[in-house]
Amino acid sequence: MSKAANADIAAIEDEALQGCVPVLTREKTYKFSDAFFFLASYGIATWNYTQGAYIASLVGFKQVLITTIFGSLLVMLIFQLPTILSTRYGIDIWVWLKAVLGHNGVKVVTIIVVLVNLPWHAICCELFASSMENLMGLAGIEQNSHVIHVLLALLCVALGVWIAYRGIKSISLVTKILTPVLLAVGVIVIIVGFTSAPITEIVNYVPDTVKSGEADAHTFYVLAVDAMMAFTFTWFAGMGGIPRLTKTEKSGYWGAVVGQGLVGPFFVIVGAVMAISMNYVTGEMVTDPTLMLSKLAFPAMGLCSLLLVGFANVGTNASVSYVYAVMVKTSFHRVGYRTMVIILNLYIAILCIWGQIMDYLGTLLTLGSCMQAPLAAMFITDFFIVRKQKMSLRAGFEINGNKTYRYTLGFNIVGFICFFIGIGINLLIYNPFTGEVNIPFLYNFTPTMCSFVGTGALYLILNSIPAVRKYTMKDRSEITV
């Protein structure tokens, strides 16, 4: 075979693995372990520590366990089911969402999701900077310069770009090394937490605001469950990027569920334990895991833990850069993978320079769940019930000018109506900006779950109307999958 032919084949495979072209069966190399290590790098991200501390500021330790397991693992078991589509056809879920939202609709929603979700990765870079500063403190080098902090955060961005730029193989190698080590660190950290304060103090912990009656325990409990559901739904956008590379549907699904649905909650609980211990030792509920480790662990362990936790954020940023670059390329396929990695990380870098993203954790959770719970509901309903796991790949990729999923000026009006009503359901039940519960009865079922169920039901009802079905189901005559 000529060099030119080999180069063409390599380019096609590169576009499949790091672009939007369907991954063929012979190109799939991922097993369960590969998917697990990659996706667990999300679960090990230090924003899980921060989330754990946030949940612990709302409810007692026993409720932390219940809300974390129920709010994350059970949700993950449900909304990861459609990843069988990604494995079966080697495509990202955003290809299917073109049938739900339309070609231009997917572009708009993709941009919104990127703007809302990527700030979480700026938080990773902020925590990397904190890790490095605390390491310097352990070494006797004190520094309070904002410029140095920003430069350290940008270093995390740069290292993530360097790994992601080299492609999926480099990212997989990094995650296979980091994930097992960081799981071990998580075990060590939770031991440090339980030995830094009496076990009875941790197990019987209740937030001061709840204990004093200043805050309503029931309202905060529901808010904690909703926060974990919202936290889990923020992973929806990138859930198809890795399962599309796995050899079997079982490997893709369980790799995602175990990698994110078990590892993520474990580290949320670790963060809660550390925050409760810090509250006992210092009288302050601290959300920064690097500060927890530097205060609670003895110097040698603190040094190792901080170093590993810090570089966990580099691995996470590399993984996220890959998943989101592939996701965005589904809609903007003319932009190269490496160019997209740089564009996405420029946005993260700007947020790091701004330096105030850590103050908006609650807002990020609210915005993420408001949008992605309705998206997940429509996707699951469309995949399993409306289209019965069959769509037109020709329309999805507009092969030979196929415009079936263009709908109205590129937007599926039915999908967008459901999308915005789903957002409205969430905000109508609970106002996250004022903390006011508007509909107490529905609030008991959590705003996120009401939005998810309500959007899915509305989408199904609308698609049962003959005139609407005729509008949304024009692809039935050209089904290829």
Image (spheres, rainbow, N blue to C red):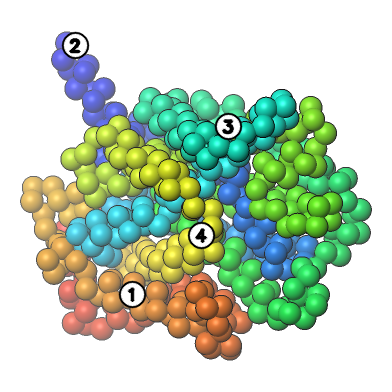
Q: Are marks 1 and 2 in contact (CB under 8 Å)?
A: no
- Front of the two marks 2 and 3: 3
**Label 1, residues with CA under 10 Å away: few <14, some 14-19, many ≥20:** some
Q: Residue at x 23, y 29 (%)?
A: 12
At a point 84% along the width and 56% down the height, the residue shown is 280
Pointer 1 or 3: first along the chain: 3
282, above or below 363, in the image = above
Q: CA distance from mark 1 to mark 4?
A: 23 Å
For residue 75, above or below residue 146: below
* Label 4 crowd bin: few (<14), some (14–19), many (20+), radius 10 Å: few
Task: Give coordinates of residue 120: x percent, y percent.
Answer: 49, 50
Q: Which residue is mark 2?
A: 3
At label 4, the amino acid type is Tyr
Q: Position of 151 compared to 420: left or right?
A: right
What is the three-letter code of the residue carrying label 3?
Answer: Phe
- Give, as a three-letter code, the residue at label 1: Phe
The three-letter amino acid code for the residue at tag 2 is Lys
Q: Are marks 3 and 4 in contact (CB under 8 Å)?
A: no
Of mark 1 and mark 4, the one earlier in the sequence is 4
Q: Which residue is farthest top? A: 2
Tag of residue 311:
3
> What whole-number distance in Å separates the C-alpha atoms at marks 4 and 2?
52 Å
Between discs 4 and 2, the one toward the N terminus: 2
**Which residue corresponds to the image point at 57% horizontal and 29% vertical from the top-left?**
176
Q: Position of residue 288 (x, y in %)?
A: 65, 48
Residue matched to label 4: 360
Residue 86 visible? The answer is: yes
Between circles 1 and 4, the one closer to the viewer is: 4
Of labels 2 and 3, earlier in sequence is: 2
